[in-house]
Amino acid sequence: MKRIACLAAVTIIGATLAAVSNEAQQARHAIRPLELAGNLYVLTSDPAEQGMRTGGNTAVFLTSDGVVLVDTKYQGYGEDILAQVRQITDMPVTTIINTHTHYDHSGANPEFPDTVNIVTHENTAAHMASSDCDDGMGYEGGSIKNCERFQGENARFLPDETFSTRHTLFSGADQIDLYYFGRGHTDGDTFVVFKEARTVHTGDMFARKRLPFIDAANTNGSATEFGATIRKAVDGIPDVDAIITGHADDPHVWQDLVDFAGFYNDLLLQAHQGRAAGRSAAEIAASYAQPDRYSEFEAPTGTLQRIVSLMLEGR
Ligand SMILES: [Zn+2]
């Protein structure tokens, strides 16, 4: 009797798990591949769909030794990414670079062979490895943190190679330059430059024509330092024409990043002037004067106020 009850329970749990994984399967969104250069592709989401869809954009870069991926989308997309890679080349994935720790950019890291060399900024590696799992946002409304994916057995999927300010991988046509300019979206955002293709993957440091999300609470991002960091990127990254952003479906151009840096730094200036005049974050946001040359940028009052509040607190 007891055994039958036990079996029944196992069956129910099994059926439930199958249903859950089936749901996850069905919930996966389509990946759209775009060729940017002979050896560089980006795996975006379907522009006809709304929301976060597959997560961050994944760059696929072919070197003479193997495939380099930049970012791995959400947990569950490893197989889909590999299927896309196989459409492009027979070479194995040998390197993964994560632009930052967030779960929509590194979620599928553990779904690749553990022989893959994983490269991140040192602060990103620390977030992934932290025992208190401080990388914040995660699955199921945050109850499952992304860094839990790198604990125990899965510690073998933590970054193998880290850097602090500049780092170069490979040479000649394969060269990739990694840049870190300081705190912004998180405290470990890497700009990944494919030298020959004159293309950069900015991760979430570039929010196109919007205000950026500043993850100050979980990953030590900084609204105050974001302005200087993005300005340093504009001044410090040479010879780039095309941009893969963290989430946009289509590639952007260098001037878009220059404009974004100008838009953000103008806001920072207005926040400083407002503070000097003794105004609150709400007052500064309400009286924000969007310059004509940035009129295409979206600056909803709620988001403005959140960012200005952080600026006033020096965060
Ligand atoms: Zn992010």
Image: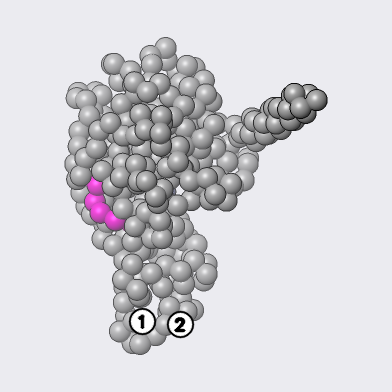
Q: Quadrant of the N terminus?
A: top right
Residue picked out by circle 2: 283
Is residue 196 depicted above or below 290 in this figure?
Answer: above
Write the start and end of the magenta stretch as one range: 180-184
Is residue 182 within the magenta segment?
yes
The picture places residue 221, in percent across and down from the top left corner, at 35, 57
Along the line of sight, the residue nearer the viewer: 245 or 185? 185
Q: Amino acid at mark 1?
A: Gly
Mark with earlier residue (2, 1) = 1
- Depth check: 10 or 215 in front? 10
The residue that appears at 52% across and 69% down in the rendered structure is: 302
Element carrying mark 2: helix
> Residue at label 1?
274
Most extreme residue toward the front is: 1
In the rendering, at what x and y percent does residue 209 appear?
A: 45, 56
Location of residue 118 with respect to 146 vertically, above or below: above
Give how far across and how far down residue 110 sits, in percent.
Answer: 44, 29
Q: Is residue 292 above or below residue 230?
A: below
Q: Residues within 10 Å of mark 2 (few under 14, many from 20)?
A: some
Mark 2 residue type: Glu
Q: Secondary structure at mark 1?
A: helix
In the picture shown, does residue 266 fall above or below 134?
below
Residue 134 forms part of the magenta stretch: no
Is residue 198 among what the camera can see? no
Q: Is residue 5 left or right of residue 109?
A: right
